[in-house]
Amino acid sequence: MDNYEEKIASDPRICSGKPCIKGTRIPVHLILGILATGEDFDGIKRAYPNIGDADIKACIKYAAILTEEEAGVVI
């Protein structure tokens, strides 16, 4: 997933502007938190059947880019 912008959007009218998976009200931080507990992609997709692997990978890519930006490096 090189282009997370295709899957992640921030709209002030949805979830107070928090980045979400496009077409949903599922915030990126929720998916990342679930991954951090050790859940796998299949478990996330069972809980949220309207998202796919590409959506989950976009959340990870988005987080990676944010951490690089904080360090002053842009991917």
Image (spheres, grey):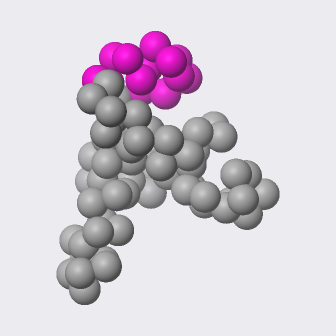
Would residue 54 be visible to someone looking at this image? no
Give the quarter of the image for residue 26: top right
Q: Is residue 49 above or below residue 18?
A: above
Would residue 44 be visible to someone looking at this image? yes
Give the quarter of the image for residue 36: top left
Could you tell whether 6 is left or right of 20 in the image?
left
Q: Is residue 65 above or below residue 41?
A: below
Which of 11/70 is in front?
70
Give the quarter of the image for residue 38: top left
Residue 54 place in picture, x, y as percent: 35, 35
Residue most toward the right?
Answer: 13
Quadrant containing the C terminus in the rendered view: bottom left
Residue 65 place in picture, x, y as percent: 30, 66
Residue 42 place in picture, x, y as percent: 34, 17
Image point (37%, 57%), residue name: 62
Image point (70%, 51%), residue name: 15
Could you tell whether 59 is left or right of 38 in the image?
right
Which of 31/22 is in front?
31
Could you tell whether 40 is left or right of 27 in the image?
left
Residue most toward the front?
Answer: 37
Image point (49%, 27%), residue name: 51
Magenta region = 40-52
Q: Is residue 20 above or below residue 18?
A: above
On whether residue 46 falls in the magenta region, the answer is yes
